[in-house]
C-alpha cells in the first residue's frame, strides 16, 4: 500500500478523496492546515509516495506550500485546485509540481495521475528521502535542485542511495562503478567522494550524508 499526503481544507472533498483512494490500495493522511502538514512531512519524509495539494488554503497560499515542500523533499506533488487558469498551472510547475489537476474532476482521474507517478517512481525515476534520481538522464536532485555531477560522481552517489546505512568498502565501490580501478594506495575514490561532499554541502567533520568508516570505507546516512 502506498501512502498519500493530502492537503485539502474542503472537508467534503477531503472525505471523498480519502474514501475513493482507499478502494485502490492508497492510504491517505489528510490535513486542513498546511503548516501542520509541512511539519508532519518533514518528520516523515520517507512515509509518503505523493502529495495531493489544494491551492486555496488557510494559513498560507498553496503555491507557497508547494515551494516549502520542495525545500524539504523531492516527493512528487499533484496540485488539485479549482484555479485552472494557464497562469496558475505554469506557476505550479515552475514551483516544482509534477502534475496539475483542475477541479472539478472525477476521482478516478486522480487515481490515474497518482498511479502514473508511482510507476515512474518504481522504474527509472526514484525518490529516496530528499534525493530524486533520474536514471534515464543520469541526474540526481536534492530538494529539487539538480546536482552538477560527473558520470563517476553520479554512479557513486547513486550506489550510496541504493545502500543507505550500509558500510561500503573502497574495493566494493570500485567494483560497482565503472571507470575506477581499486588500489589500496590510490586515493582516487576518496577524491571523488570529497567532490560529492562539496556538491552536497556536506561537512566531513559533521556529516549529514557520507560518513567515513575508518579502515573500511564509507556509509551513507542521509
Image: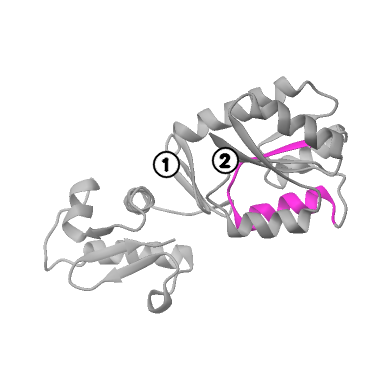
Q: Residue placed farthest to the left in the image? A: 184
Q: Dot 1: few (<14), some (14–19), or many (≥20) neighbours within 10 Å? A: some
What secondary structure is marked by label 1? loop
The spot of residue 56 in percent (x, y) is 87, 44
Q: Front-most of 89 and 150? A: 89
Q: Which residue is mark 1?
A: 138
Q: Is residue 202 above or below residue 71?
A: below
At horizontal 54% and vertical 32% (from top left) the residue drawn is: 118
At horizontal 32% and vertical 49% (from top left) the residue drawn is: 159
At horizontal 67% and vertical 53% (from top left) the residue drawn is: 69
- Distance of label 2 from label 1 (alpha carbons): 21 Å
Q: Front-most of 112 and 66? A: 112
What secondary structure is marked by label 2? loop
At horizontal 31% and vertical 62% (from top left) the residue drawn is: 219
Left or right: 20 with respect to 44? right
Q: Which mark is residue 49?
A: 2
Instruction: Give the magenta range.
Output: 60-80
User: Is 210 within the magenta?
Assistant: no
Left or right: 76 with respect to 150? right
Q: Front-most of 13 and 54? A: 13
Q: Earlier in the sequence, mark 2 or mark 1?
A: 2
Q: Front-most of 5 and 85? A: 5
Amino acid at each position: 500500500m502506498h501512502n498519500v499526503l493530502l492537503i485539502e481544507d474542503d472537508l467534503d472533498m477531503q472525505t471523498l478523496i480519502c474514501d475513493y483512494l482507499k478502494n485502490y490500495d492508497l492510504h491517505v493522511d489528510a490535513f486542513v492546515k498546511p503548516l501542520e502538514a509541512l511539519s508532519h512531512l518533514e518528520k516523515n519524509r520517507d512515509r509518503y509516495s505523493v502529495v495531493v495539494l489544494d491551492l486555496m488554503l488557510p494559513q498560507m497560499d498553496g503555491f507557497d506550500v508547494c515551494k516549502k515542500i520542495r525545500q524539504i523533499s523531492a516527493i512528487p506533488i499533484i496540485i488539485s485546485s479549482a484555479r485552472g487558469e494557464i497562469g496558475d498551472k505554469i506557476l505550479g510547475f515552475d514551483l516544482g509540481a509534477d502534475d496539475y489537476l483542475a477541479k472539478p474532476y472525477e476521482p478516478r482521474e486522480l487515481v490515474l495521475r497518482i498511479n502514473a507517478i508511482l510507476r515512474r517512481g518504481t522504474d527509472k525515476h526514484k525518490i529516496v528521502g530528499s534525493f530524486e534520481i533520474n536514471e534515464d538522464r543520469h541526474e540526481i536532485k536534492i530538494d529539487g535542485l539538480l546536482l552538477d555531477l560527473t558520470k563517476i560522481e553520479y554512479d557513486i552517489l547513486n550506489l550510496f542511495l541504493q545502500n543507505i546505512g550500509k558500510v561500503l568498502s573502497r574495493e566494493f565501490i570500485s567494483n560497482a562503478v565503472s571507470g575506477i580501478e581499486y588500489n589500496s594506495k590510490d586515493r582516487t575514490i576518496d577524491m571523488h567522494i570529497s567532490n560529492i561532499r562539496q556538491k552536497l554541502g556536506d561537512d566531513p567533520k559533521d556529516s549529514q550524508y557520507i560518513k567515513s568508516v575508518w579502515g573500511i570505507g564509507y556509509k551513507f546516512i542521509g
